[in-house]
Image: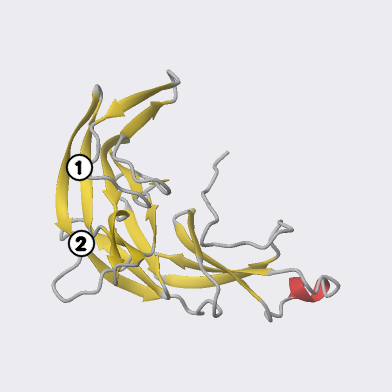
Amino acid sequence: MFRAAGSRICSVERYDVERDEWEALDGLPRFRAGCVGFAVREGGEEREFWVMGGYGDSRTVSGVFPVDEYYKDALVMELRGNGGGKWRELGDMWGAGETPRFGKIVMVEDEDGGSPPAIFMLDDNDILRYDMASNRWQKECSVPRRAPCKSSYGLVVLNEELHVMTIVNGIDSTETRRSRHQKRAETLFMQIYHPRKKTWRCLVTKPPFRQPLDFSTTVMCPIQL
């Protein structure tokens, strides 16, 4: 899973770990920033590279306030052994009358490699699942406990589960009772969703950081050893 933020770009490159080299691929049809990209595997090999969301041009409201124009489509590039192919545009991911959502996107890979990855979006309190066949987002479920006012969610995939994280206060647990002397310490509340079982569980812990966490700017990813 890759995320592009900051400056609008259209260049695409693939890194070869064995040769320690970057390979230039066909550029995006339009400039984008803030988009999400991921590789789709088939038979243990990467077959396609997908890019979703992001924003390109901007417009002004009342001629003063700049507003980004968000993309509502998806792009797919076929990956080959000697490089990538051309981009294929899948069109609008939202149906007529639907309000586009622009939340955090993550991918859950099938560890056996027999099924396409499951793609999820966290927008406000809702989790949506992307259907590749219809090129549409559909609501999967809602987060059991909403994030406190003026706070944000973090979203990461671990062991094929969605971890929805937020910083909260007022949760009373064995661990928090043991650390009453750390009254100013923040509490990390994780709501964990299993897509196959469609079940929720939760964990409460203390972040290992002294500085406050801002999930709107924090970058998270799993690391396997």
* Neighbours of disc 1 within 10 Å: few (<14), some (14-19), many (20+): few
- Residue 19 falls in which quadrant of the image? top left
Using the image as rendered, state which of residue 198 and residue 215 is in the foreground.
Answer: 215
The reply, left or right, for residue 177 in relation to residue 141 is right
Residue under numbered circle 2: 93
Observer able to see residue 39: yes
Residue 163 in the image: x percent, y percent? 50, 62
The label on residue 129 is: none
Q: Is residue 158 above or below residue 28?
A: below
Residue farthest along the right direction in this orientation? 181
Task: Locate the C terminus and report the quarter of the image it occupies.
Answer: top right
**Mark 2: secondary structure:** loop
Say which of 54 and 2 sits in front.
54
- The answer to whether 23 appears left or right of 222 in the picture is left
Q: Height in image: 179 above or below 221?
A: below
Q: Residue furthest front?
A: 63
- Residue 40 screen position, x and y as percent: 29, 43
Quarter of the image for residue 27 reads top left
* Label 1 sits on residue: 29
Q: Amino acid at mark 1?
A: Pro
Q: Are marks 2 and 1 in contact (CB under 8 Å)?
A: no
Please tell me whether residue 43 is drawn above or below residue 35 in the rendered image. Answer: above
In the image, what residue type sits under mark 2?
Answer: Met
Does residue 202 appear left or right of residue 119 in this picture? right
